[in-house]
């Protein structure tokens, strides 16, 4: 089937996307060196700053969360591809306002290669940078092998919590420790009912049958070993909630954050029906949802499905989650 998208030349996809994104959000962000989205408030930031990186094609992630209270610079690669280490090093140098830089990276092969090369250059230049990796996909590795877990939507609440800690004047070591504690207590599981197409090539990222879904689908169509017959919203929620609770060892009386992140082609109607069941399950188990979000944060073009994210929460993490932020695609009044 021919790919139908409102694009121009495939070679200019990322550049035109970023130019349009920045034009639509000039009050909050600017474009530097062609592919780095920068918080307009960075120039006056007397605090720890936050840099992240990732391929385009997942909008609003990751650049949609650049702004006060979250990310200061987002280095953007081509569609589903990591940027190069020089661009990341340049962004870190630009972002550093004397208090150090938190460098948040999602665990994917290309991003980790870039991040490791960037950190070698950072160390050679004596820059004050700490790297935090988000790796919370429960489907492709057990918790004891978390370094093998893919980074999914968990980067977004990590940005929020780290950004709030930085805004309160915490040191780089403190901000990194808070971000790492949150990252160590989060888990995500994705489900897909239909794969996406690569907007540059038209190739299908995952081929699912008409009556199939896959629990454990990765960010770019990677299989998770959970292909099965399509199930109802409640049945799907039951499988996914219980898998996340088991992975995190959440017990009765604990507090959690719950996010349902649409993958690009799943309607809010569907997400709210799933969320309804998630809340029922957690109430039955006497587990309190103290923070939540339902909508699209990190997408995969027109992939049908969603990512279910859960994190163990405490009063300190909840405080940072509730602090104000102002970015194109996530805002809180505090």
Image (cartoon, rainbow, N blue to C red):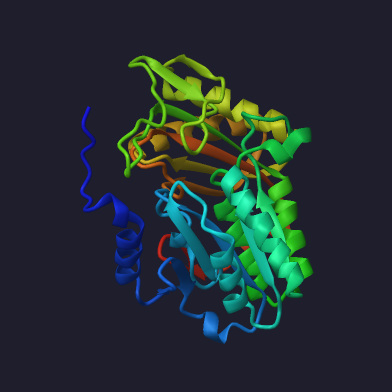
72 in relation to 295, above or below: below
Q: Residue at x 64, y 32 (%)?
A: 138
Q: Which residue is drawn at 43% across and 61% down?
A: 64
Q: Residue 16, how many percent across, how many down?
A: 30, 61
Q: Quadrant of the N terminus?
A: top left
Decide if residue 85 is in sight here.
yes
Nearer to us in this view, 237 or 254:
237
Relative placement, left or right, of 293 versus 174 is: left
Q: Residue 18, how many percent across, how many down?
A: 36, 63
Nearer to us in this view, 83 or 59:
83
Q: How many labels does the image show?
A: 0
Q: Residue 143, how many percent across, how many down?
A: 74, 34
Q: In which quarter of the image is the C terminus?
A: bottom right
Q: In which quarter of the image is residue 195?
A: top left
Q: Residue 89, how many percent across, how many down?
A: 61, 69
40 in relation to 211, above or below: below
Relative placement, left or right, of 190 versus 311 is: left
Q: Which residue is drawn at 64% across and 56% down?
A: 115
Decide if residue 251 is in sight here.
no
Nearer to us in this view, 75 or 159:
75
């Amino acid at each position: 089937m021919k790919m139908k998208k409102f694009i121009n030349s495939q070679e200019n996809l990322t550049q035109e996307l970023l130019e349009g994104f920045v034009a639509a959000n000039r009050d909050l962000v600017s474009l530097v060196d062609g592919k780095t989205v920068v918080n307009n408030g960075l120039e006056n930031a007397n605090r720890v700053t936050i840099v992240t990186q990732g391929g385009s094609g997942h909008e609003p992630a990751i650049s949609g969360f650049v702004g006060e209270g979250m990310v200061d610079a987002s280095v953007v690669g081509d569609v589903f591809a990591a940027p190069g280490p020089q661009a990341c090093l340049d962004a870190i140098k630009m972002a550093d306002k004397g208090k150090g830089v938190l460098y948040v990276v999602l665990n994917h092969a290309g991003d980790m290669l870039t991040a490791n090369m960037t950190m070698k250059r950072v160390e050679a230049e004596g820059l004050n940078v700490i790297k935090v990796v988000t790796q919370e996909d429960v489907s492709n590795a057990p918790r004891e092998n978390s370094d093998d877990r893919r980074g999914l939507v968990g980067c977004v609440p990590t940005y929020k919590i780290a950004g709030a800690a930085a805004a309160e004047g915490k040191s780089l070591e403190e901000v990194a420790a808070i971000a790492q504690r949150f990252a160590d207590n989060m888990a995500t599981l994705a489900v897909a009912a239909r794969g996406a197409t690569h907007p540059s090539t038209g190739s299908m990222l995952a081929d699912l049958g008409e009556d199939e879904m896959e629990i454990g689908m990765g960010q770019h169509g990677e299989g998770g070993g959970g292909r099965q017959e399509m199930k109802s919203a409640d049945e799907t929620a039951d499988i996914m909630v219980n898998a996340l609770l088991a992975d995190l060892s959440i017990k009765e009386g604990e507090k959690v954050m719950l996010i349902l992140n649409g993958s690009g082609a799943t309607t809010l109607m569907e997400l709210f029906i799933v969320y309804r069941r998630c809340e029922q399950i957690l109430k039955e188990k006497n587990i309190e949802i103290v923070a939540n979000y339902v909508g699209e944060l990190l997408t995969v073009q027109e992939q049908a499905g969603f990512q279910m994210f859960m994190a163990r929460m405490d009063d300190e993490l909840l405080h940072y989650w509730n602090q104000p932020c102002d970015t194109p695609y996530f805002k809180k009044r505090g």
